[in-house]
Amino acid sequence: MKILRTGCALFALAVATPALAQTPSQAELADLVRAQAAEIALLKARLDRMEGAQQAAVAAAPIPVTPPPQVAQAAPVPRVTVPFAPQLAPPGPAERSIAQATASRDNPSGVTTEWGAGLPVFHSADGVYTFKPRGRILADVSSTFGSKSDTRNLTTTGMRALRLGLEGGVGPHFFYQMEADFSENEVDVVTAFIGWRNRINAAFDYDVRAGHLFNDRGFEGSTGSDSTPFLERTAVATAIIPQRGFYGLGVMPRLFWKSGHASLTVTGDRIDGTQAVSDGRTVLGRAHWNPVKTDDTVLHLGIWGFDESLSPAATTLTRNTVIGGRFNGGLRVSSGPLPGGTGTTGYGLELGGYRGPLWFMAEGGRRRARLDGGRADFVSKAWSLSGGFFLTGDLPPYNPRLGSFGQPRVKRPTFDGGPGAIELTARYENLDYTDLPTGGEGWAGTLGVNWYLNSFTRLQLNAIHWHTDNRSGAVTGSDDGQTVSARVGVTF
């Protein structure tokens, strides 16, 4: 409007310019100025009225609201149905299902690390590469008393496990894992493998592992030492076992479906430096099924078996099996000397499950050792009943994909101000080597409490009443006593 007023004034001066050119008198000049002033005042009044009318119209009109630009909504990420229970800590790259591995690749977020249980999982921005350090620290103390022999009344300490390792993957299919243990103050390679996983169809997927492999054998025999509900595995897991132990070098294909899995393992001996004679050969199979599987209830059925042909360098089948704790070398159930073995065959059954915070498991197994020289086979027998109850209401850390226990996802960790997860446990186990003239027998009853501070830190306490009746060894005849053991465990 200021520009309009200035233009009107200049127009009035331009109209008056010809009259000024005739050199008017003083009176004419005065009349002209008064006339121009009156015209300017009239124009100003007219412009003021126009401005007022315009402002009123603007005030009366509704203010237009420009709608925000429409933002394209990202398509919702489909929920990946995985066979792991929600009460379990997230699995590492080497134990993920094909659905989890594919989801990680197809939905890259640019995130380079994720904190799962203890140590981070590193991801490339495109979701193709994953890598995770691994570690396990299990420190035990054990005290035995009540034995008739002072050689058994010992107080000892030991590292149940002291491991460092790594795992990772490339894309959704290829994965690897390697761990070394230092618990005996020396390097022992335990798990070391590469693998490939894929989906057969909507109902089945599989993986294949090749390398130094942990047995898939029985419920507790397939559970890692950092996840067992007691400080030591059951007599079934420690006695009904291939002669090579818990590990062998070979290949393991595994098939998974919604309610179970099956595996077949073919291995030679453990990693060693002996190449002058042939390795032994072990074929081991296991399957488990969950006929009942809901959010808070699972029924577990399992079956397993193995057959091994012994290496010429490992024909001694003598067994000295723990019964009252690992860290008392004098407290064992012994088979007595048993040379001249040619092979063994073993099998077992599993029945268990959980409902809410209560779980139970029954296991039984037999192992037949074949001997040379026409001698009769030697049969070992073992069975156990175990159970537990979480006072804090947490669900048992049962892994329905593998049919074993895993690392729990604690609902209210102590580091967040909660109580953690508190579990009471009980077990009875029985072991029988009396098929041999020199073989012994024994049983043990255990009461325990586990306090899970969070998903990777736990405190465990076991009180064991044990009985042995050995026919050979340093302590023979009937003997009873008690062992109290405790553990501090951290798993990454």
Image: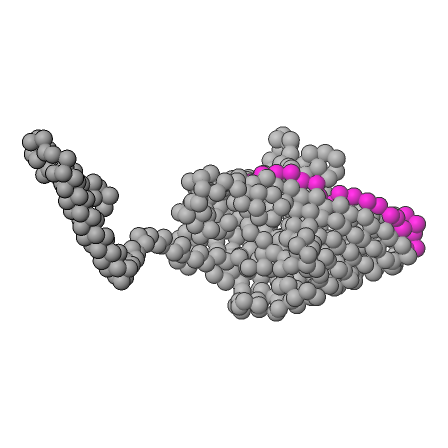
- The image quadrant of residue 193 is top right
Residue 26 falls inside the magenta stretch: no
Is 337 situated above or below 274? below
| Left or right: 275 as drawn, with respect to 442 | left
* In front of the other: 92 or 38: 38
Q: Work out whether residue 324 can be spotted.
A: yes
Residue 163 falls inside the magenta stretch: yes
* In front of the other: 144 or 416: 416
Number of marks drawn: 0
- Bounds of the magenta segment: 147-168
Name the residue: 68% across, 64% down: 392
* In front of the other: 139 or 89: 89
| Left or right: 235 as drawn, with respect to 278 | right
* In front of the other: 269 or 413: 413
Name the residue: 16% across, 47% down: 39
Q: Position of residue 93 (x, y in %)?
A: 52, 45
Q: Work out whether residue 311 can be spotted.
A: no
Q: Position of residue 228 (x, y in %)?
A: 68, 54
Q: Position of residue 60 (x, y in %)?
A: 27, 62
Colour mode of the rendering: one colour
Tell me the quarter of the image containing the C terminus. Answer: top right
Q: Position of residue 438 (x, y in %)?
A: 81, 52
Name the residue: 75% across, 54% down: 460
Tell me the chief SS of the magenta region.
strand
| Left or right: 338 as drawn, with respect to 345 | right
Name the residue: 62% across, 68% down: 356
